[in-house]
Every structure is written in C-alpha cells, then in structure tokens.
Amino acid sequence: MNPLDELDARIAGCAACPRLVAWREEVGRVKRAAFQDWTYWARPVPGFGPPDASMVVIGLAPAAHGGNRTGRMFTGDRSGDVLYKAMYELGLASSPFAVSMDDGLTLRGVRVTSPVHCAPPENKPTPGERDMCRPWLVRELELLAPRLRSAVILGAFGWQAALPAFAAGGWRVPKPRPRFAHGARVTLERADTRVTGGGTRAAAPEASGPGSVTLYGCFHVSQRNTFTGRLTPDMLKDVLRAAAGEAGIAPYAPADERA
C-alpha cells in the first residue's frame, strides 16, 4: 500500500467529531427516497485521484447524499456533475459522469479532496470540526508536495481552511493572508527557501524541498452558484485550465474533438 492509500484508509476510519459521526450515520440509515436501495458509505470520504498528481482541487465537505452515499468526493450529486463535466472537457477526467466508486472514472494529473471529510448538517462544519480535520489535509498535501504545483480552491470556506493547511505543510503563506475571490491567484513558496538581495534561491540541497504552489480561487460548484449563474461552466473551466497549465498538465483537445 502506498502512503496515500494508507492515509485514505486512516481517514475513512476517523471518528473524531461526534456531531459529524452522528449525522453521517443517521443520513445513511434514513436515506433519501431516491436512494433507498443504496447502502450508504456513511463514513469519512478520502481524497480521489492519482498519488503523483501535480494539481489538487479542494472543496468544502462531502454532500450528505453525494459523497457520504457513494464514498467518493463529488460523486453522486449535482455539484460533482458540474465539476467532473468541466474536468472531462479539459481532459482531466476520463468521463463527465461520476455516479459510484465502481463507475471507472479516473483523473489525470489531478486529485480532488476537501478540508472536512465527513458530511456536515446543512453543509456547515463548525470551526472546531474544520480544525480537527486539518491534519488529514496537511498530510495529504505533504505527500503530494514533490509534484504539486497548483491548487484550485472552491469557495471561501475551502480557502480559509486550505491556507493554514498549506502553511503547516511547509509553504510560506503571506501575512495578512490573501483574501478569497473568484479568480484570486497567489503563489506560495516553500518555507525552506531563502530570500536574498538577488532574489529567491533554494536552501542547501539537504534542506531543500519541492517548489512553489499556485492557489486559484473559484466559486464553489454548489447548486446555488451554478443554478443562479454566479459560476458558469466557462468560468469554472477557465480556472481549471489555468491551474492545469501551471501544473504542467498538457492540454487535451475539447471532448467533441477527441477520438
């Protein structure tokens, strides 16, 4: 088992937040009428994507009847429909559809995760729950760090949760912290670099780490944002495309031009 798979297994067994444990399990018992024949995952939902990803997409938390049902990030709900369709059209996902863990969907160069791994009531984790879950995101970023070059952060909550995680994972976050906005872009240098009069240079080889990572702010792919047009498919694709370019993921042709 590689370290990221091991981390995912540990995340899936977490029971640190009593309110979230009670809620995710209650949702799994009661179910939504349309999903009565499903056996809900009803556990923390780990990240999804290859261990050598150079780009990460960071959301908020699993949806009660989406990831909490299927066991995979942004899978089985309308937010995921929007996200994976955009990723597919940019060549970052093998399919525009994400319905279950066994649907064959794979991601190319990208990993999808969140700062809170359990479905929260009303999609609103508390600050304490966010902070309790932070070490999982920190460790995930540390494992991705050797290749990680960009991150798309969905929504203000994700932005506020991600910045301390990047700081704890070894990146230097500016003070005051950058504010969230759609289209915001900020590059974080590794904390093991030195700034001199001639610019930034790497520390001694034995102390140096991987390079910088550029964060991109994007409105969340929530139904409220996508139904009202606050976030359009083109707006989402523009951010994903820029982040993929920063991460060195070669572009694919549009979906209708691919064989």
Image (cartoon, helix red, strand yellow):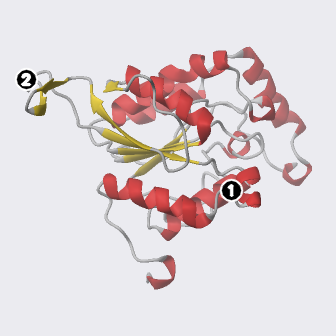
Q: What element carries label 2?
A: loop
Q: Given contact means CB atoms under 8 Å apart, are the residues at marks 1 and 2 in contact?
A: no
**In which quadrant of the rendered image does the C terminus lie?**
bottom left
Q: Which residue is pictured at 65% across the width and 52% down the height? A: 221
Looking at the rendered structure, the kind of residue marked 1 is Arg
Residue at numbered disc 2: 204
Residue at numbered disc 1: 230
Q: Nearer the viewer, residue 145 or 75?
A: 145
Looking at the rendered structure, the kind of residue marked 2 is Ala
Which percent across, then down, holds residue 96? 58, 66
Which percent across, then down, holds residue 146? 26, 37
Q: Which residue is pictured at 70% across the width and 26% down the height? A: 125
Which percent across, then down, holds residue 77? 72, 53
Which percent across, then down, holds residue 190? 26, 29
Q: Residues within 10 Å of mark 2 (few under 14, many from 20)?
A: few
> Along the polypeptide, which appears first: circle 1 or circle 2?
2
Query: Distance from label 1 to label 2 (Cα)?
Result: 46 Å
